[in-house]
Amino acid sequence: ISPLLALVGGAEFAAVPFQEGDASLEMTMPQHLSLGTSVQILPDLKVNVDVKWTDYSAWDTFTIKFDQNVDFLNLASVINQLSSGFGVDDNADPNELRLPRGYEAVTSWALGVEYQWDDQTVIRFGYEPRGSAVPDDRLDFLVPIGDATLYSFGFGYRIDADSRMDFALGYLHSEFEADVRWERDEDGEIRAVGESQNANDTTPGQVVYNPYAFLPIKGETSAYIMAFSYDTLF
């Protein structure tokens, strides 16, 4: 079928049970800005407030390049071409995969409380509601996190005049879901509409990246974080 597919932008199929090669992804790390202040409310009580901004809109598309034509991308590129009339983006070439992300810049804030227990020990509590950089219409399991909340607890201990150690535990939790709803189109027909273009879109021919077409999805992510540091002057 390779000659036929060539008429709609396809390449020749390798038609082998296994393909092996190299792939590359060039990723730009989002720029990040944070601003904070620390206020000594009482002699033994300090409050810390931070505001953070990260430009995740830099992750609009992940482009993975392969060193050869890959059969599944070859087929995906043909499907994209044939489905262009339905508004499907061209997200595949025989040797390149483009994963649309559509992420957004996000601003969040964090609150920390520090209590001086005695001359050597300080106790800390933290709370941070993290807004998601993933819009509701872009949720999927490639980045399985929506709006999240981080709780933390820790302490610091001064060993002597030159040395101290710090320890902290954190718990982060996030839940998200993308449903499939039913709506009436311009012709009066009822059709299913997936809420996430990156996961359960119902547009004909949307094969990249859309692994759960027509299926409602939901996800839950929990992270347990531990940090320890030891500092000394020498």
Image: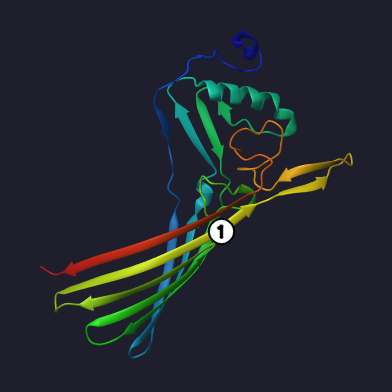
Residue at position x 42%, y 23% in the image: 67
Q: Picture quarter containing residue 81? A: top right
Q: Quadrant of the C terminus?
A: bottom left
Task: Provide residue 80's location: percent of width, then percent of height.
Answer: 65, 27
Task: Provide residue 109's location: percent of width, then percent of height.
Answer: 49, 69
Q: Give the farthest residue toward the top.
A: 3
* Left or right, residue 102 beside residue 54: right
Q: Amino acid at mark 1?
A: Glu
Residue at position x 33%, y 89% in the image: 44
* Left or right, residue 89 beside residue 113: right
Residue at position x 30%, y 76% in the image: 155
Label 1: how many Cα within 10 Å (few below 14, some 14–19, many 20+): some
* Left or right, residue 46 beside residue 208: left
Residue at position x 59%, y 34% in the image: 208
Q: Name the one closer to the observer, 17 or 69.
A: 17
Q: Quadrant of the N terminus?
A: top right
* Left or right, residue 96 beside residue 41: right
Tell me: residue 58, above or below residue 116. Answer: above
The residue under label 1 is 175
Q: Name the one closer to the observer, 15 or 49.
A: 15
Q: Give the farthest residue toward the right.
A: 188
Q: Picture quarter containing residue 84? A: top right
Q: Name the one closer to the observer, 168 or 49.
A: 168
